[in-house]
Image: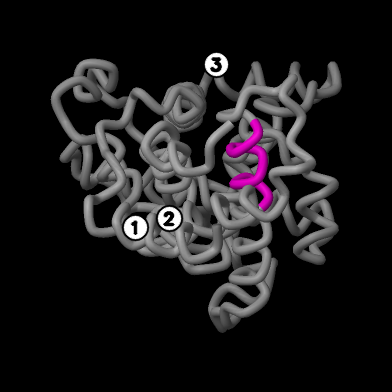
Amino acid sequence: MNPQTWLEEHGDALYRYALLRVHNETEAQDLVQETFLAALKNRQTFSQQSATRTWLIGILKHKIIDLTRRQFHESPIDEDLASEDHLLDDFFNEKGHWISPPTAWNNPEKSLENTHFWQILHQCVQHLPPKFAYLFTLKELNDVTNEKICKELELSATNLWVMLFRTRLQLRQCLEIHWLGQKGGS
Amino acid sequence: MLSCKKVSLLVVQSQELPLRFSQKMSVGIHLLICRGCRAFKKQMTFLQHFIKRTDNDDFVDVNLPKQAKERIKQTLLNHF
């Protein structure tokens, strides 16, 4: 095991992993650096049984969770979104009907091949209100359970679901407009 | 009869949690008659499927920029 070759062997993979989740290049680069530094400091504890890549990704994942949790708590609360009762008002009327019903996407799989789906998704995530973007990041780490997210972010389960729901609604709308070029929503 | 708001929330939840039988029934009936919610459900499945592909990092064609790599290398050497 040679820390000097880590960067060459694993740098790109760690960067991709981070970038796909934090949606910000500078932050992703910093995370990669912090991961290597932490790995360097703890290289005695590294067990050869786990592959170096897996070990490094594990450290990176913790770094992403820490960063995201901090950002979530530090980001200001958007006045309009502070009240859970009104969180879905942009999408549903008082009777619970769609204000602008989703229309079927034509051939999304095909569009996926010839457009930069990920770039658009990144842009759409960046356009979410900060707290929602950070929640999305935590959620997409996959192995962070809802219970853990609620605990880390000090949210109730209902809270969490409404926020996740709004995130999906907003991403859906953003993708429809910017990726598929369909005339979406309001 | 459930509203679109309620049904689409259940659709999002059902991607992670099993719904109760009665919920499944109500959602199923609503989807039969509501084109908007049907489109929504399809799109959520699509979205989830493709976001899951982030686990395969080869899917994205980006590398650590040279400058960043050099910077990180220097930092690591200073700490080695």
Q: Chain of mark 2?
A: A
The type of residue carrying mark 1 is Glu
| Residue A138 picture location, percent across and down | 63, 49
What residue is shown at x 71% (from left), y 34% (from top)? A143
Report, in whole angstroms, how far the alpha carbon at label 2 lies from the one at label 1.
5 Å
CB within 8 Å, label 2 to label 3: no
Report, in whole angstroms, how far the alpha carbon at label 1 lies from the one at label 3.
44 Å
Magenta region includes residue A54: no
CB within 8 Å, label 2 to label 1: yes
What residue is shown at x 80% (from left), y 55% (from top)? A150
Label 3 CA crowd tier, 10 Å (few <14, some 14–19, many 20+) = few
The type of residue carrying mark 2 is Ala
Residue A126 visible here: no
What residue is shown at x 65% (from left), y 40% (from top)? B9
Q: Chain of mark 1?
A: A
Element on which disc 1 rests: helix
Report the front residue among B3 and A169.
Answer: A169
- Residue B32: mark: 3
Label 1 CA crowd tier, 10 Å (few <14, some 14–19, many 20+) = some
Report, in whole angstroms, how far the alpha carbon at label 2 lies from the one at label 3.
44 Å
- Which image quadrant for residue A152? bottom right
Magenta region includes residue A59: yes
| Residue B62 picture location, percent across and down | 26, 38
Question: What secondary structure do most residues of the magenta stretch adopt?
Answer: helix
- Residue A28: mark: 2
> Image height check: is A22 above or below A2?
below
- Residue A25: mark: 1
Element on which disc 3 rests: helix
